[in-house]
Image (cartoon, rainbow, N blue to C red):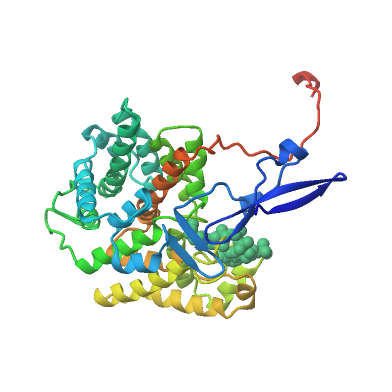
Amino acid sequence: MAEYVKLIYDGKTYELPLVTGSAGEKAIDITKLRQTTGLITLDPGFANTGSCSSAITFMDGEKGILRYRGIPVEQLAEHSTFRETTFLLINGKLPNREELDTASERLNQTSLVHEDMHIVFQNFPRNSHPMGILSSMVTALRSFYPELPVVQEEINITVMRLLSKLRTMAALSYRISVGHNIVYPRHDLSYCANFLNMMFNSPVKPYHIDLDIVKALNIFWILHADHEQNCSTSAVRVVGSGRVNLYAAVSAGIAALWGPLHGGANQAVIEMLSGIKESGKSLSQIVEKAKDRNDPYRLMGFGHRVYKTYDPRAKIMKKTCDKILGKLKISDPLLDLAKKLEEVALKDDYFIENNLYANIDFYSGIILRAIGIPTNMFPVMFAIGRLPGWIAQWKESMDDPAWRLSRPRQIYTGPVEARYIPIDER
Ligand code: CMC
């Protein structure tokens, strides 16, 4: 039986339908609200707004649950690879062996970046942030790979190109930024191993591929692969709703991810930890500073819009961190500092009352440092990981008959009507 919520306004009663998701969460359907009542809703930051229905990722922020297509992220991190998880997110099911082999072959075929693009990469100023370069170059892909006339073929090839080339382009921008030779992708290497080789192989010291590092990178990217309607994914959907090409929509996602409150937080955590170490301040002083409402300082890598308990990804990240540092016999003082800081924060009333726990970014940077990734590349690593999610969400939106141009409204608070004053009378 259909359920409704009653809204009483201006002496009239309106019935707004209730929508129930497959895991039981409920929403008020307000699609006819303005048409029937003249009202709109106001929800800064969209904390109470469902922007779409989606069958891709399920999150329960109170219980700390994250599932891709119904499969718990813990199981995927343990048993799957990033390539397989990518297939799952985009196609809605785990691939069989043949499907996975075909997808790998297509990724290999599309892994090279047009040679003329190398010239563009070379001409960015040396100290440009790699996220800015990546976002620009992803849009530029449209110029180098023009649209195909058959829609389905165009979508399939664009998806493969993005998945394969983003990884090549990330490594390319790093090599150029440090003035090293370009390492091309190799046909015989897996997705993650190929990336590591493109980043670190050198004519004077061949890169040794360590399977434990490959596994850690797979876990890192699996944990980042989707997170329902977060800031960058919403950017991809909003920009995509104008029916731009997928390159442009993904480029918008990269730009949105760059910020320190979102994908830039992994870089910000390492900078914060280094700053604490250098400052000589005690951890309780740092926590006090983060709590001060008159001080913009926050504990980076803490808190989340949806998780009001421990971020399930952070648990896996912390475990992987200990494992990889142990295996590589690295003792990172920032890891010890991070653990101590977490301990102090988790005992603090402010953090307890506001449900502020460590999120995925708190430990992820330590793993990336151990692998040898430079700090300003951390958000790029997040972007490669989030790409399958962006693509899956974009595809879902394009296939959704209810999908419309994203165009929120507002409550206007400026002057109702003002007179134009000629410049000499002002
Ligand atoms: N340090 C200190 N205070 C905090 C923090 C923090 N990290 N996070 C939230 N608060 C405060 C916040 O100011 C608010 O206080 P008040 O009520 O006085 O205004 C209170 O805690 C409740 O915050 P909230 O409503 O839960 O926060 P939000 O949903 O608006 O913001 C957030 C979520 C992630 C932007 C925020 O927690 C933050 O800035 N964290 C640090 C940046 C970070 O780690 N970002 C990565 C998020 S995970 C990766 C991703 O998915 O993008």
For the point 24% across and 73% down, the residue is: 328
For the point 51% across and 64% down, the residue is: 300
- Report whether residue 399 is seen: yes
- Report whether residue 298 is seen: no
On the image, which quarter does residue 331 sit in? bottom left
**x, y percent for residue 378:** 38, 57
On the image, which quarter does residue 286 sit in? bottom right
Drawn side of residue 211 relative to residue 248, left or right? left
Location of residue 276 with respect to 265 vertically, above or below: below
* Foreground pick, 159 / 217: 159
**x, y percent for residue 376:** 38, 54
* Foreground pick, 29 / 249: 29
Image quarter for ligand 1: bottom right
The quarter of the rendered structure image containing the C terminus is: top right
Location of residue 51 with respect to 415 vertically, above or below: below
Location of residue 1 with respect to 270 vertically, above or below: above
Location of residue 147 with respect to 210 vertically, above or below: above
For the point 29% across and 67% down, the residue is: 79
**x, y percent for residue 264:** 45, 55
Drawn side of residue 401 relative to residue 14, left or right? left
Drawn side of residue 70 relative to residue 344, left or right? left
Total numbered circles: 0
* Foreground pick, 11 / 122: 11
**x, y percent for residue 385:** 36, 54
Drawn side of residue 279 relative to residue 111, left or right? right
Residue, far right: 11
On the image, which quarter does residue 263 sit in? bottom left
The quarter of the rendered structure image containing the N terminus is: bottom right
